[in-house]
Image: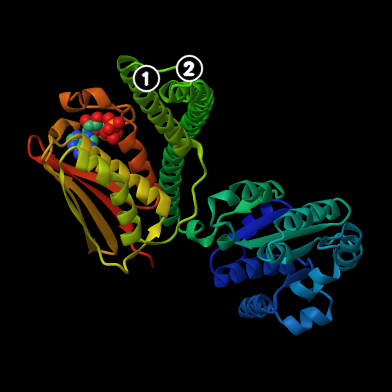
Amino acid sequence: MQVLPALHEHGNHVVQFYEESDYLCQVVADFLVAGLSNGDPAIVIATEEHRVAIVSQMQSRGVDIEHARVQGRLTLLDARTTLESLMGNGAPDAALFESVIGEVVSPAGTGGKRACLYGEMVDLLWRDGLQDGAIQLESMWNGLAERHSFRLLCAYAMDNFASASDAERFMEICRQHDHALPTERYSLRNGATQLLHISELQQRAKALESELEYRTKLEAQLLDALQERDELLHRERAARADAEAANRAKSDFLAVMSHELRTPLNAIAGYAELLEMGIAGPVPERQREMVSRIQHSQQHLLGLIDEVLTFTRSESAPRRPLENVNLAEALRAAELSLLPQMRSRSLTYMPVTCDANLVVCGDAGRIRQIIVNLLSNATKYTPRGGTVGMKCEVANGRVAVHVHDDGVGIAPHHLETIFEQFFQVDTRLTRTDEGLGLGLAIARRFARAMNGDLLVTSTIGEGSTFTLLLPLAG
Ligand code: ADP
């Protein structure tokens, strides 16, 4: 029989951590047998599995279990049943503990005897997820020890503390005891082996400390980076809100200005017409020509104002719902509105060839507006006698409408900038009829709002092809 006097010298309340039940049961049996040999009674509050193993270990150390029980020197209790009898509201109840456990401990510790008690109810509570309850129960045991004479050995499976977040509570358990015994891995009794294992333990602790330090540093860096990202996001959001507010102010200003300019312009148009009609007396030929110029300029100015208004609206207006649009009809309508201008510039027009049943997903009004803009540009930027045309093809679930001309063309470095608002290439061809450089910006914005796009290819002196891409109706 191997007795562990050391266990008894460690104090009144000792905790044993363990990895294998076999080892635990040996330690418990040693503890109890040492007590029994000393004439002290033994009490075991353990699970059935552990009770059977402890009893068997005690028997192998020469204890007559039945005899000891009959004599009242050995009490065997079930840990689960005993624990249930002292629980109240999901936690161990101090009054129930006092009466249930007090009743077991009190007779055992009389007549100068000091009971040796092994209990694992705390381990059960821990496994049940009631860690606070386990710590409360430990402290109840400490309270009981002040009124009764016993030595208490508790045990916890090391598996319970596998996570780094258990460290705090692990220390709390250790603090509840006079002595904490490490698991069998570090408790071998052979001096040399023990030294080896302690070195191994120290090495592991060192490695863990370094790992912890490294992770803490990493965590701090991560937090800094997150904070920096939040600040950036915050600044970016504020800048975007400022830009949106400025843009809204600009749009409001343009909308009001355009509206205000239309009233005097309409008055100019009206009075010019009255003059032309001879309401204020006969109009000599020379003055008639001047009135016609006034009317032409008035029309031009009105066109520019309308363009600004359309652009302003395209920026702030909510998205319009998309619907199925017969493409051939929309293209035909745009074509018709441009024919007179083309004729007046003696251009040859190659009418669109488009499947009459082709249906796209979009907005008929906006498709027409885009095509009118492209044809009008083709007309403007193609010298007299040139050719303008429109073609249509289907590829990859999309329709491509090409508006082509053999006009002045666009330099490679201007191929993207022409889509920017208020951008114009200075060409002598259009000096007198200049627009504002908004048409293509509006057209591309409309195309993209329909989940399509507007692209261009061009060679200077040879002509340009603008391509409107639109999704086919599903
Ligand atoms: P605007 O025609 O009012 O100037 P746009 O936005 O429609 O404005 O066009 C921007 C610029 O793109 C034009 O000033 C012109 O230089 C160039 N451009 C557009 N279409 C053509 C074309 N078919 N051929 C050559 N240049 C073109």
Classify 73 as above or below 194.
below
**Which residue appears farthest toward the bottom when viewing the image?**
66
SS class, disc 2:
loop
Q: How is the image coloured?
A: rainbow
Quarter of the image that includes the N terminus? bottom right
The answer to whether one can see residue 415 in this image is: no
258 vs 26: above or below: above
Position above or below: 59 against 38: below
* Callout 1: SS: helix
Which residue matches tag 1? 291
Instruction: Work out whether residue 345 can be spotted.
Output: yes
Tell me the kind of residue under disc 2.
Answer: Ala
Residue labelled with disc 2 = 280
Q: Position of residue 155 (x, y in %)?
A: 65, 62
* Residue 98 location (% of width, % of height): 89, 60
Q: Which mark is residue 416?
A: none
The residues tagged by marks 2 and 1 sit, at their Cα atoms, a distance apart of: 13 Å
Q: Nearer the viewer, residue 104 or 293?
A: 293
